[in-house]
Image (cartoon, rainbow, N blue to C red):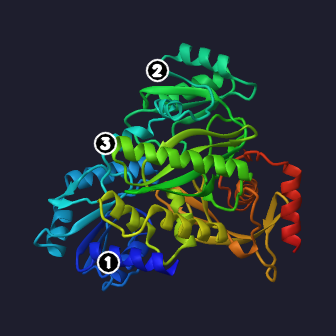
């Protein structure tokens, strides 16, 4: 492990050492700036999309808040794209002051396709052929080309009667899922709806029609939403462990609640192997057909019939934070940048996989939370909580907590986060049910208005999962 980490950091130092770097948007920007400083970057300019700059060491980076955070990824990325394509006078002045010779390299968000920023190269810009692969209405062709098992699906233009007719055909008794896609950024279940009735179909159509060009209809699949990450190197594809996508269902509503990700869940070994094998095949296909480099996510559902894929995202996914936490000495986001830029990292895909996979299996984490509109907090409020089975209550003063609930101000009202305490969390069970219980407590304590939620049901016997959690809590 030490050999691989040393080799990677040495190669990344060659890429960023003694260079000016502009971080244009993104998450964990303070961490990225510190990583660049450790690699020998001359200085870093952080253009933060948030409204308030955190306290920061000016030796590490110059921090400029753009004040364009939108609360939703699509809004924020649209605003950032406009800024990169045509920055205003104030941003141009900041750039000239930081980099008068226009010699800096720019790193933007994983969504970005813009290749230059005021004459400076954006070295992690995505190619359009990579972006097109994220379309949920065309991805089934890839599963068929790879001979991968998938759920039946139909795709239509915005024709309500045909969509409803397909829904009646494909419904296995639990409804269907409509997934729209088109020119708008699609993530976090924005354009995904569960349809169980004609009324829900009408509501879903009203949401999807203004934003999407086509809609895919497929049966609702019972099971745990999961993702597996692949990282395409020049010599092969490194494949990591499954990550649970925490997606509670809203009772009586068609809309899902995307609440983040966590690595505590272990699907059955045969499903894990199924996921990882398909991810490796997908990575090799991407490398051979569109010259892909870097991280992609393979998403789907762990069902009683095995893993059934639903989409891929050809970018550094948000769930990579679980792997960043597992290997804190490895700047994974900068590895992504280097691969997209075509930089030789000096190690093989298998060496990289062995280090990161083992660390992630041994160190579990999560990033769970949701935006809330019902409240508008003016300051941060935290509550320590304990899980008892699938219920959640406030922890006593002298009692070890399983997690911390945090309500913070947000551009759209409030932000609710559930920080799971790794040292007190059992490994193996999904965290969706715990999230539902914690969010119910947040509704009770703060009036967050998330409403009645239901967790996804795991492949394993639910009673056994509950028993294992109770045993872990008692221990």
Which x, y percent locates residue 376? 55, 59
Q: Are marks 1 and 3 in contact (CB under 8 Å)?
A: no
Q: Which mark is residue 158?
A: 2
Name the front one of labels 2 and 1: 1
- Residue 375 in percent (x, y) is at 59, 56
- The quarter of the picture where residue 124 lies is bottom left
Q: CA distance from mark 2 to mark 3?
A: 24 Å
Residue drawn at x 30%, y 82% is 40
Describe the element under mark 2 as helix, strand or loop: loop
Q: Which residue is mark 1?
A: 13
Residue 303 location, x and y as percent? 72, 40
Looking at the picture, does residue 171 appear above or below residue 376?
above
Please give the label number shown on residue 471.
Answer: none
Residue at point 44%, 36% (across, down): 135
Mark 2 or 1, nearer chain start? 1
Q: Tell me the tag on residue 128.
A: 3
């Amino acid at each position: 492990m030490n050999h691989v980490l040393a080799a990677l950091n040495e190669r990344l130092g060659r890429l960023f050492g003694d260079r000016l770097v502009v971080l244009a948007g993104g998450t964990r920007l303070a961490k990225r700036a510190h990583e660049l400083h450790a690699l020998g970057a001359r200085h870093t300019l952080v253009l933060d999309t948030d409204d308030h700059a955190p306290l920061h060491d000016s030796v590490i980076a110059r921090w400029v808040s753009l004040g364009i955070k939108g609360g939703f990824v699509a809004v924020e990325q649209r605003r950032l794209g406009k800024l990169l394509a045509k920055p205003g006078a104030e941003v141009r002045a900041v750039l000239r002051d930081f980099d008068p010779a226009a010699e800096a390299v720019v790193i933007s968000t994983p969504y970005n396709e813009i290749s230059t920023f005021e004459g400076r190269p954006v070295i992690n810009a995505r190619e359009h052929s990579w972006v097109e692969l994220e379309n949920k209405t065309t991805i089934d062709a890839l599963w068929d080309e790879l001979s991968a098992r998938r759920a039946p699906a139909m795709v239509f233009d915005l024709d309500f009667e045909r969509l409803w007719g397909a829904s009646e055909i494909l419904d296995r008794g639990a409804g269907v899922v409509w997934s729209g896609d088109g020119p708008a950024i699609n993530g976090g279940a924005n354009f995904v709806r569960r349809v169980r009735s004609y009324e829900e179909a009408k509501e879903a159509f009203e949401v999807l029609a203004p934003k999407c060009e086509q809609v895919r209809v497929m049966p609702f699949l019972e099971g745990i939403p999961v993702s597996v990450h692949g990282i395409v190197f020049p010599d092969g594809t490194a494949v990591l462990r499954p990550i649970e996508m925490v997606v509670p269902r809203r009772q009586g509503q068609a809309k899902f609640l995307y609440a983040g990700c966590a690595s505590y869940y272990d699907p059955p070994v045969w499903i894990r192997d199924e996921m990882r094998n398909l991810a490796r095949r997908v990575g090799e296909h991407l490398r051979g057909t569109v010259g892909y480099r870097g991280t992609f996510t393979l998403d789907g559902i762990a069902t009683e019939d095995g893993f059934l894929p639903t989409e891929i995202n050809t970018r550094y996914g948000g769930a990579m934070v679980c792997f960043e936490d597992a290997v804190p000495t490895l700047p994974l986001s900068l590895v992504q940048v280097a691969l997209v830029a075509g930089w030789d990292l000096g190690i093989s895909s298998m060496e990289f996989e062995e280090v990161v996979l083992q660390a992630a299996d041994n160190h579990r984490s999560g990033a769970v939370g949701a935006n809330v509109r019902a409240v508008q907090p003016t300051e941060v409020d935290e509550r320590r909580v304990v899980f008892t089975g699938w219920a959640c209550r406030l922890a006593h003063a002298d009692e070890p907590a399983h997690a911390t609930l945090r309500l913070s101000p947000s551009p759209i009202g409030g932000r609710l986060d559930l920080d799971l305490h790794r040292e007190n969390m059992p490994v193996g069970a999904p965290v969706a049910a715990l999230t539902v219980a914690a969010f119910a407590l947040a509704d009770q304590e703060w009036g967050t208005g998330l409403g009645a939620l239901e967790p996804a049901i795991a492949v394993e016997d639910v009673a056994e999962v509950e028993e294992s959690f109770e045993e872990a809590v008692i221990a």
